[in-house]
Amino acid sequence: MKKYRFALIGCGRISKNHIAAAIANQDIMKLVAVCDPVAERAEKKAADLATGTGEKPAVYADYHKMLDEMDIDCCAVATESGYHARIALDCIRAGRHTLVEKPMALNTADAEQMIREAKQHGVTLGVCHQNRFNAPVQQLHKALEAGRFGKLVSGSARILWNRTMPYYQQAPWRGTWAQDGGTLMNQCIHGIDLLQWSLGGQPDTIMAMTGNYLRDIEAEDFGAILIRFKNGAVGMVEGTACIYPKNLEETLSISGETGTAVIGGLAVNRIETWNFAKSAAQDAEVAKLAGTDPKDVYGSGHNTLYRNFIHAVDTHTEPLVSGTEGIKGLKIILAAYKSQKTGQPVKYDGLNFSTLDMAHDDVKVD
């Protein structure tokens, strides 16, 4: 495998995980450039990378100039959410394989265009849902693929976190309809992705109630979603930024005819329940998992996500979290917003909605 040359666009809160992934995967990638309009942030990340690899990347303020000047195979987009789609499309059109932070876009049209143009330009598109690579989550999917749950009945994702006003004030784009969305889009999308992936990946109908209770932001600080999947299973989401006084849990529960599993902790990284009608060889592997939470809510999944993405690029295959996978959680959240807006259940198929529609009064039920 060749060593792929990467550029990181966006050096904010999540960028440390991208830097860590570049350091962890030095054998197959080299981060040759970092870009951010705030020079101090870009220089700081360049220095962090140099500490880990011994080589300082080029530093840019303008990603267009970087794309023109640098020999780059892949771009990672880790900017404010509202810029993800536009920047990713520019990278795709420049012929660069593109890995974009969640959410991949803030409306269905942009996300679908990203998927379509990546195929047209022959590049790989991936989305950063790193929690799919958590060891307990991987074991859960091994059990699902083996049919150990029998007929799936239900699942739930509980994201009970705290985000105070200083968090939103630190970066004024947070909590806005134009650049972010609320707690469902920002904090809960990883859990929603895991829930839909576990329950069959084919949502049918979504109903939701959301509201703003404690935080002075445009979007919701609490949301509850019901999802009926095409296989009949029902998913439930409880997501909030209002837990006092700090993050409490992020938990995924899956229940079926012959099995129940609960993965919890601060960031779906600890197996709390593992009950099946029949034992299997993987149960010994599960017993060996340490079960300790990561140091922060992001965990270390970016390291494996990068490796999976690079393997997909190298083998001309799809990464585990491709664009067609990344859009699923996004569409569930946009459907939930539309359900809150209209007071009606919303069909997943054919959905056309944007976070900006939440600021308008003329949204109609399809």
Image (cartoon, grey):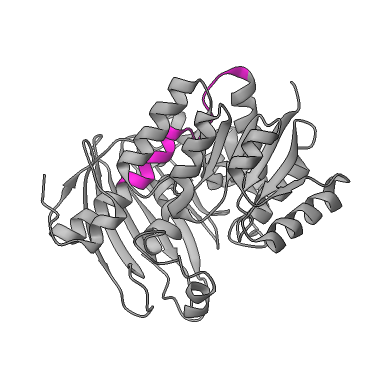
Q: Quadrant of the C terminus?
A: top left
Q: Quadrant of the N terminus?
A: top right
Q: Is residue 163 visible?
A: no
Depth check, front residue: 154 or 324? 324
Image spot of residue 289 (x, y percent): 66, 48
Q: Is residue 129 magenta?
A: no
Q: Is residue 270 visible?
A: yes
Depth check, front residue: 292 or 357? 357
Image spot of residue 26 (x, y percent): 79, 37
Report the span colored magenta.
315-331
Residue sitting at x 54%, y 35% = 91
Image spot of residue 222 (x, y percent): 34, 69
- Asked if 4 appears above or below 260 in the picture, the reply is above
Q: Is residue 319 magenta?
A: yes
On screen, residue 25 versus residue 279, left or right, reads right
Q: State the count of labels.
A: 0
On screen, residue 23 versus residue 233, left or right, reads right
On screen, residue 313 versus residue 361, left or right, reads right
Name the outermost residue toward the right: 54
Residue sitting at x 48%, y 73% = 168
Residue sitting at x 65%, y 58% = 294
Residue sitting at x 69%, y 35% = 69
Image spot of residue 260 (x, y percent): 41, 47
On screen, residue 224 versus residue 47, left or right, reads left
